């Protein structure tokens, strides 16, 4: 069982390997919601995520013989780094099985802590099955990423820190993958103060905990296809489910598109890189009545590769109408391009890409096509630019924006 004594022991032990992640008050999110919003930046941990807590505490509970056999786990990335780093601290071998689609940054960092990495399967569940086979074959000690009460107790140390720093917290928002994090946090939070409401957040396309709570038992989803790769789990843990059933007040679902906007908000207003799974709690604020409440959003990790990051930024700018593209037809004669550019400049639009197609029509004198990608301040500004182009007779047509 997860007892207060176990949580207290875990909270003390993990201090040896964790960075202090003091709460950050968010002026921006507080103004947006009418509440007092605080961020718990676990993306600032040495391994880039909270997972070091559960991994280190679990390994500390193993016998010397269990450690000598070597450790194995399956992970989409953050638990992998946690186990690899913790195993390094205890001086034992670690083998990590990761899905083949795991971002390269997570693979390389896991290797950098001395672990052996095996890539297998498309999602966590595939990697897990293969890790179990290797554990049986080689005699390794398995360290489960979420379906383990010692791991969950280690993750629960986050709740201890939150309550010590902000005793009057009203809501704690927690991302959910397999359920280890939320089971630990919710159980300890209710022990410390039953009035604290703990709300879980899942990606809509990987809502395995919601399915389990609905059915009253673990349910395996057909797929877990989400950009929140750290929470792309098809089935939650049966060991932790009872704790979630007892202690979690609500679960909210977030669409992938909402995570894109949350990423931009975090970069522009807080100067922090947070991975998509870690942004679930921020994106979910819109669904919660935060007025007059003290709310803590757990930012579970920040391990995002730069290719994913660039894609998220581009899609976010397009989504918010800060980047858009139009097609206009012009007679093929000198001065027309200047006229278009001046119309855009007069409205303070910023051209970032031009494509000139002289072969859109067999009659070039009648029309050539100009495709313009430009930057705006947002939707209202975009429409001002479009209206100006329309008034000048260019008849702009919106097309899909592409920066690269």
Image: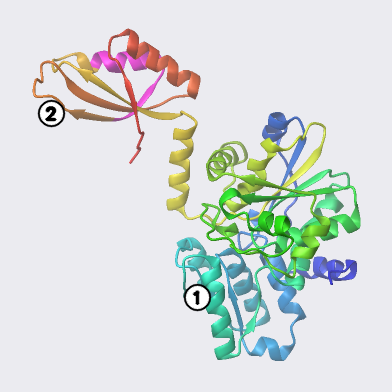
Could one spot residue 114 in this view of the protein? no
Left or right: 249, with 327 as reference point: right
User: Tag on residue 117?
Assistant: 1
Residue 344 position, x and y percent, is: 35, 17
User: Tag on residue 359?
Assistant: 2
Left or right: 9, with 303 as reference point: right
> How has the structure been colored for display?
rainbow
Could one spot residue 324 in this view of the protein? yes
Judge the density around disc 2: few (<14), some (14-19), many (≥20) Cα neighbours within 10 Å.
few
Quadrant in which residue 369 is drawn: top left
**Cα–Cα gap, marks 1 and 2:** 52 Å
Judge the density around disc 1: few (<14), some (14-19), many (≥20) Cα neighbours within 10 Å.
some
Q: Foreground mark, 1 or 2?
A: 2
Local secondary structure at mark 2: loop
Q: Which residue is at the front of the view, 152 or 92? A: 152
Left or right: 97, with 157 as reference point: left
Q: In this view, does 294 lie above or below 217?
A: above
Query: What residue is at 27 percent from the left and 14 percent from the top?
Result: 394
- Extreme residue toward the top, this view: 391
Residue 107 position, x and y percent, is: 49, 67
Q: In this view, does 344 lie above or below 56?
A: above
N-terminal label among 1 and 2? 1
The quadrant of the image that shows the C terminus is top left
Q: What stretch is highlighted in magenta?
A: 338-353
């Amino acid at each position: 069982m997860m007892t207060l004594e176990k949580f207290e022991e875990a909270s003390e032990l993990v201090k040896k390997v964790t960075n202090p992640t003091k709460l950050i008050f968010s002026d921006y999110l507080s103004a947006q919601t009418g509440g007092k919003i605080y961020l718990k930046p676990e993306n600032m941990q040495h391994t880039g995520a909270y997972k070091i807590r559960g991994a280190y505490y679990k390994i500390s509970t193993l016998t010397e013989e269990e450690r000598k056999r070597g450790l194995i786990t399956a992970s989409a990335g953050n638990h992998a780094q946690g186990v690899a780093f913790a195993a390094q601290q205890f001086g034992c071998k670690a083998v990590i099985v990761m899905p083949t689609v795991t971002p390269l940054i997570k693979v390389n960092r896991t290797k950098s802590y001395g672990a052996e990495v095996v890539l297998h399967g498309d999602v966590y569940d595939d990697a897990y099955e293969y890790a179990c086979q290797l554990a049986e074959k080689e005699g390794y000690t398995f360290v489960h990423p979420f379906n383990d009460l010692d791991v969950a107790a280690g993750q629960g140390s986050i709740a201890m820190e939150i309550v010590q720093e902000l005793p009057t917290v009203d809501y704690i928002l927690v991302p959910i993958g397999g359920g280890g994090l939320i089971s630990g946090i919710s159980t300890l939070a209710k022990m410390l103060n039953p009035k604290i409401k703990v709300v879980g957040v899942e990606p809509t396309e990987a809502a395995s905990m919601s399915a389990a709570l609905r059915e009253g038992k673990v349910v395996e989803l057909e797929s877990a296809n989400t950009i929140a790769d750290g929470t792309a789990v098809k089935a939650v843990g049966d060991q932790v489910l009872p704790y979630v059933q007892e202690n979690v007040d609500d679960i909210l679902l977030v669409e992938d598109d909402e995570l894109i906007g949350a990423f931009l908000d975090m970069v522009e207003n807080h100067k922090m890189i947070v991975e998509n799974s870690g942004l679930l709690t921020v994106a979910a604020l819109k669904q919660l009545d935060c007025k007059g409440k003290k709310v803590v959003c757990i930012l579970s990790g920040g391990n995002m590769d730069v290719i994913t990051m660039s894609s998220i930024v581009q899609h976010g700018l397009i989504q918010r109408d800060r980047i858009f593209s139009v097609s206009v037809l012009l007679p093929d004669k000198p001065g027309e391009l200047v006229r278009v550019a001046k119309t855009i400049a007069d409205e303070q639009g910023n051209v970032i890409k031009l494509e000139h197609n002289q072969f859109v029509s067999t009659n070039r004198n009648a029309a050539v096509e100009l495709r313009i990608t430009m930057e705006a301040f947002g939707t209202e500004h975009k429409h001002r630019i479009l209206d100006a182009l329309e008034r000048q007779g260019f008849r702009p047509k919106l097309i899909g924006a592409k920066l690269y």
